[in-house]
Image (cartoon, coloured by chain):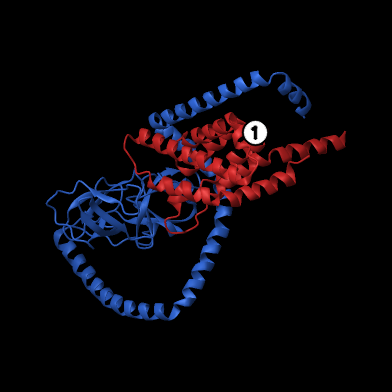
Amino acid sequence: MKSRTSGSVVRLAAPLRALAQRFTFLLLALASVALMMVGKVEAPVVDDVRARVTDAFAPILDALSRPAATAARVVEAVADIQNVYDENQRLKTENARLMQWYQTALRLEAENASLHTLLRFSPEPPTSAITARVIAAPGGSFYRTVVVTAGRRDGVKKGQAAVAGNGMVGRVVEVGEWSSRVLLITDLNARIPVTLEQSRQRAVLAGDNSDQPKLLYLPPEAPVTVGERVVTSGHGGIFPAGIPIGVVASSGERGVKVQPLADLARVEHLRLIDYGAGSPLGEAETAPRETK
Amino acid sequence: MTLSFWQRLDKAGRNLTPFAITVMLGLLGMMPLRLPAFAEVAPSLTLMSVYYWSIHRPDLLRPSAVFAIGVLMDLLSGAPLGLHGLILVLVQGTVLSQRRFFLASTFLLMWVGFGMVMFGAAFTEWLVFCALNATLVPFRALFFQALLTLALFPLFAWAFIRIHRAFLQG
């Protein structure tokens, strides 16, 4: 190509080129800073660009995530085989306990329904869920997001709660055509209105980059017991009320820390909860909701 | 004529190697590995690649390409836009301005140089992030990320040297 000509130019004008190069670096560094400003000021535009670029790379990320998922599964399978007996015993006892709970739940459901009719309680809008696979979990010290394979065409909307197995893991912050990004509850920017299940105390769950997010705006005299469940409060109307998030792990001078129920490092599939969309089909009820 | 066209295509393909490897490593770094507490200390693979190729073939990894890779990583990873662009460009600028030092004769010296660049980059990232969020965030996770990247560097550098010799010599 141009190698010969550019080679002689380099020899002739090396100092000039070095200067130009220095200038390029300065220019590019300034451009980065300018981009950061744009990201701060024009966040919606940047989110849109992000969603488009993520869409474009989603197939590649999807392809790359499959071998990783398989490897993780193989490792887990080996570990499972090792403790299959203990696991069986544990599950038997757990099943016995859950059967009792099931009976209790049925009784409470019936009782709740009859009380609702007595009170003319207006029911909450039905929820439906979209299941999506996690295809990217970008490593970074200061941001916790995952990319999932469901987007606008699947009905994903910004703000939907993402639930993995037994607890909420985050909420949708960007929606592309066939991919979207979920901000995990441990991210520095995550804020979720929550209620402590027993004391009915309201608070805001705020990520702080550690594995255990903390509770903000709790009154100092509020009784907080370690082990108490933390659920979404439904305030703000973004998430349904009562999605379990975690349990209080510690309460001390450094604030109240919450241990998420879901293992955030190992989520493979997420359910994005469509709330208030009024889906008449009433697909799989996603979380036990409670009413005050 | 035909032969020269294919030769040119071959050369162009080979010359794309550093860029392609850096992008691929960036995407590989986003794989969900499902290891506990791994995401926050996931090694910075693009940084290794930019460091290596900036020392050995800066003509094939231009500052503009490095900047583009950084911005792409920002967009895909959910990091503040421009963060990786800035860091990667600064890393390349540092390496090129002191290339004589970094173009070390022994592997150990290259590793030591990488350690210095890595911790400089981690510190820059921390500064930028604190400035962007107007809060002091703990440096701990970044420190361990830098350590892990440093520990894995020989493995990747070995692969880079292999690839360098296989595709870009002669």
Q: What residue is shown at x 37% (from left), y 57% (from top)? A: A163
Residue B154, x across and y down, in percent: 59, 50
Does A88 appear above or below B165?
below
Chain B on-screen colour: red
Q: What residue is shown at x 51% (from left), y 45% (from top)? A: B44
Q: Chain of mark 1?
A: B
Residue A213, x across and y down, in percent: 30, 51
Residue B162, x across and y down, in percent: 69, 49
Q: Which residue is mark 1?
A: B58
Q: Quadrant of the N terminus of chain B?
A: top right
Quadrant of residue B65 within the rendered picture: top right
- Colour-to-chain, blue: A
Q: Is residue A116 left or right of residue A18?
A: left
**Nearer to me, A42 or A1:** A1
Q: Quadrant of the C terminus of chain B?
A: top right
Does A32 appear above or below A235?
above
